[in-house]
Image (tube, rainbow, N blue to C red):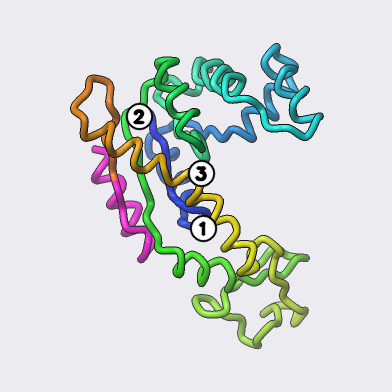
């Protein structure tokens, strides 16, 4: 089971990725984790990536693709893998295709922007314990206070509405094009094309999970 998970930040990809990797016994591969591991071990590609990272630049696509090809040879990828946050752009998707990295399914979790803003900007947390709340969906007993300690709850900077909107803008400008790219390829009838699955990301977690599992049979 070789999968790519697509969806806007806050669409619930992380939660569903956990369900998928447990069911199919496959690793979740993010470019960030992959880069850190390669740098730590000191592989040739890792050292190359480190040069760009140290200079504050973006790691070029060819280095990323090289790391991906190395990573999926590892023993834990015997049953497949789940790409999380990769590819991010059409050139990365094209490079992966040219490199012969096969994909069985592309799963898109579709959630409207307004729902994502409500989800993320309503989150509050108790920093000391890590307990989380939501002003609408899981409110504390006393507004703005932790249920256990009574201490103030905080809103993380990346959950603030203006930051969420900025992240959504980046997603729409850069990554959303992949939805068209992969759905067109899936519908092309070409050999080696992945199947494309679109699920509604609004609703109960388990309902969304079951819809994905039924589609992946």
- Per the image, the residue denoted by label 2 is 1
- Per the image, the residue denoted by label 3 is 174
- Real-space CA distance between mark 1 and mark 2, rounded to the nearest whole angstrom: 24 Å
User: Can you tell which mark lies on residue 10?
Assistant: 1
Identity of the residue furthest to the top in this view: 44
Query: Considering only vertical position in the picture, is 153 above or below 11?
Result: below
* Nearest the eye: 138 or 200: 200
- Real-space CA distance between mark 3 and mark 1, rounded to the nearest whole angstrom: 16 Å
- Mark 2 or 3 closer to N-term? 2
Identity of the residue furthest to the right in this view: 54
* Nearest the eye: 34 or 87: 87
Q: Secondary structure at mark 3?
A: helix
- Real-space CA distance between mark 2 and mark 3, rounded to the nearest whole angstrom: 26 Å
Query: How many residues crowd around disc 3 within 10 Å: few (fewer than 14), some, or many (20 or more)?
Result: few
Q: Which residues are magenta?
A: 198-217
**Relative to 66, is 95 on the left or the right?**
left
Q: Position of residue 154 (x, y in %)?
A: 72, 72
């Amino acid at each position: 089971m070789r999968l790519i998970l697509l969806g806007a930040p806050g669409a619930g990809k992380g939660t569903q990725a956990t369900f998928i990797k447990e069911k199919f016994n496959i690793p979740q591969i993010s470019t960030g984790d992959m880069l850190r591991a390669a740098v730590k071990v000191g592989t040739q590609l890792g050292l190359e990536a480190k040069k760009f990272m140290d200079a504050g630049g973006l790691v070029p696509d060819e280095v990323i693709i090289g790391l991906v090809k190395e990573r999926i040879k590892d023993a834990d990828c015997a049953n497949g893998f789940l790409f999380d946050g990769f590819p991010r752009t059409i050139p990365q998707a094209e490079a992966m295709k040219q490199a012969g990295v096969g994909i069985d399914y592309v799963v898109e979790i579709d959630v409207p922007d307004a729902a994502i803003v409500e989800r993320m900007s309503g989150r509050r947390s108790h920093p000391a314990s890590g307990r989380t709340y939501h002003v609408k969906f899981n409110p504390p007993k006393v507004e703005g206070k932790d249920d256990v300690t009574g201490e103030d709850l905080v809103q993380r900077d990346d959950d603030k509405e203006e930051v969420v909107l900025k992240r959504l803008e980046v997603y729409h400008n850069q990554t959303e094009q992949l939805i068209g790219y992969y759905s067109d390829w899936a519908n092309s009838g070409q050999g080696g094309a992945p199947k494309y699955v679109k699920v509604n990301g609004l609703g109960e977690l388990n309902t969304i999970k079951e819809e994905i599992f039924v589609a992946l049979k």
